[in-house]
Every structure is written in structure tokens, then in C-alpha cells.
Image: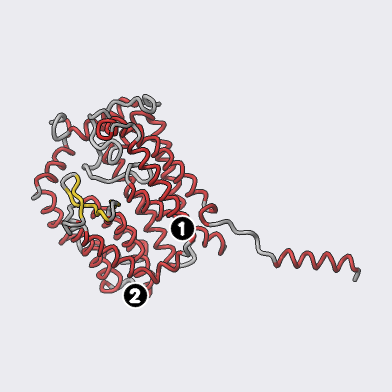
Amino acid sequence: MSAKTTGAQARAQKTKAVPPKRLHPFFSIKSILFPVLLLAGIGIVMVYSASSAISMEDHNTLFYYMKRQSIFLGIALCIMFVAASFPYKLYKSLAYIILLAAVGLLIAVLVPALNVKAGGAYRWISLGGITFQPAEFAKLALILFMAYSLSKKQEMIGKFTVGFLPHIIVFGVFAGLIIKQPDFGTIVVMGLICWGMMFVAGVRFLHLLSPLPLIIPIVYFLIFKVEYRMLRIMTFLNPWEDPYNTGYQITNSLKAFGSGGLTGKGIGLGMQKMHYLPEPHTDFIFSIIGEELGLIGVAAILGLYSIILISGTQIAKRADTMFGAITAAGLTLYIGVQVIINTGVALGVLPTKGLTLPFISYGGTSLVINMAAMGILMNIGASVKHDR
């Protein structure tokens, strides 16, 4: 054998021995990173546009909410990077700690010395000048605990007392604490995520339906025996009956979409944010998008969400562990359910609920937790890509 041939073989073996350079999970899952960054960027612009009138009136500047949202976004991006760096399998060992932390924070909301009242509800905690909403963290905590518990019990997932009962009890504890705030919308979101994750994990469908005889009277009481919730349902069924009082939220939201047309009025040129539509920079920012960016803008934003949801579904299907698959499914449901409810409320196809639009609506806690969820999803996706 010649020295030339031997040298070539040595170089070939050396090349094989060096593994290909692996991108950081934050950068490798572009089908999630790019849509999230685009939505967050759109959010900064739309928060400025939607809140400018309120900001000027309350804070004597047009940029108050936009500046705060920009700071929130900077923090959220750092959190997403850290979450993407943290090996997702380690959350299994932290599941109970995270769960107990969430319960503790939900209890703290009920403490008068800590809570902050806004809109007639106690949903926020103020510590050291920092205000945050524990229910947002509780959603993520529930997802991680459910994924850990359901993946651990796969061999007996079909048993009612193993696959279903423990998880519905945990959800019941969360729901009992959150209804005290009160925050019925968050309970609905968490319930849908909980049931969806159990379905994905293989819990028997009959078991998933078993609570209905109990849930129906509870929901009936919470809605039809509570005056303001009953009023929301009646308004939802016929908002134009009283468009200047009980129906003003839905009717002004529909007016925003109707006046936007195909291409919209242009950023900053909408009228519904001028004290017609309540909470234009939070709950009803999608309506302002419809008015200022039109059908094209609305379709583009829904398209970005679709890319995230499709990517999350693919990651869940290809995950190398059951824990990763169920976690990815839960995180995808988490974003999807919020998008469906927020946009459904804005379009008048769902009763009014105080839920933000992920990555776009003003709000530090929701933005940080949503970004953290996407960071975890990226880590799961990068593990799938590397293993395959």
C-alpha cells in the first residue's frame, strides 16, 4: 500500500471521527424561532398603535406601553434562549417542584398584602415593584407535571385510577384556586390542555367523558347563577340588541374588522382604539390588527401561528421519548387554545374571555411564559433532529 493511499485513508477516518457541528436549539428549529420573532415584532408595533391614545391620556406619552413591551420582549427572549438550552428531560426531576411552586403562587394571589386588583379581579402579585400573573406560570407547570406523570404511567394508562383520576384531581386543585380570583377563562384553557394531553397520552376516551355529569352542573352554576357571566352569554348570543351597553365590546370589535377591509386602514389609522374598544392593546388587539392591517394582515398572522402549531405537532410525533412527545403536545395545545379563544372572541364566535393573544398582546407575564414554552419546544425539537 502506498504512502499516498495510507494518508488518504487516515484523513477519511479523521473526518468521520469529527461529528458535524450542531446548532444551538434556539437557532436550529427555525420553523418555530422565525414565526415567534415575527409575531413578537408585530406585537411591538401593534401594542404601540393600539395603546397610543390610552398611553397619552394616562401617562402623557405615546410610548409608555410600547417601551414596557419592548423590555418584556428582551427579557422573554433571554428566557426562551435559556429554556432552549436546558435539556428538556431534566424537567422530569423538577416536575413536582414546579407544580408546588405554581400552587404556592396561586395561594399567594389570595393574600391581601400581596395581590393587586385590576378589572374587579385579583389575578396579580406585586413583589418588590414587579407585578406578575401566577395563573400564566400555572399553565406551564400543569403541562410539565402532566407530561411527567402521564409518561411515567404508560403501562397502566388505561386504568381509571392511574391514567385519569390523579390528573383530574391536580387540575381540580388549580381550578379551585383560580376560580377564587376569579378567572374562568384560564380554567377553560387549562381544562382543554389537560384533557388534550390525556387524550394524546392514551387515556381511555370513556374515562375522559366520565366527569361530564359533574362538570355540567358546575359550569351551569358558574355561568347561569353568576350575573355578569350570564350577561356575557346573552350578549354573545345577540350583541346588537344593546350595542351601546352590554354589547359594546363585541360590536365595536366587529366594526373594526368590517372597516379594515382587505388591506386595512394602515398602522396607526384605526379608530376603534380611540376609547371605543376596551382593552385594545391586550384582549382585543386582534381587532385592531383587523382594522389596521385588514384581511391580508389577519391571514398572515394566522399563517404564522399555523406554522408554529404544525411544527409543534411534528415535534410531538417524532419525539424520542414519551415525556418529550406529551410535553410537546401540551405546549402546542397551550399556544393553539389561546389563539383560538382570543381570535374567536374578537370575531364574535365565542363569548368574551379575558385572554391575551400569544406573543402579540401587551403583558409581561404571558409573553415571558409563552416564550419559555417555545424554548422548551425548541429543545425537544433539537433533540429529535440530533437523534435522527
Q: Position of residue 365 (x, y in %)?
A: 32, 51
Left or right: residue 376 versus residue 8 is left
**SS label for mark 2:** helix
The residue shown at (33%, 62%) is 141
Residue 69 position in % (x across, y down): 37, 42
Q: Nearer the viewer, residue 29 or 40?
A: 40
Towards the viewer: 150 or 20: 20
Name the side, left or right, on which 245 lies relative to 363: left
**Residue 212 marker:** none
- Residue 156 is labelled as 2
Q: Three-letter amino acid code at disc 1?
A: Val
Q: Residue at x 13, y 49 (%)?
A: 223
Query: How far apart in space, not on screen, are marks 2 and 1 (Cα)?
Result: 34 Å
Q: Secondary structure at mark 1?
A: helix
Q: Nearer the viewer, mark 2 or mark 1?
A: 1
> Residue at horizontal 41%, vertical 31%?
296
Residue 354 seen: yes
- To which residue does mark 1 refer? 82
Residue at the front extreme? 128
Q: Residues within 10 Å of mark 2 (few under 14, many from 20)?
A: some
Q: Is residue 264 above or below residue 122?
A: above
Quadrant in which the N terminus appears: bottom right
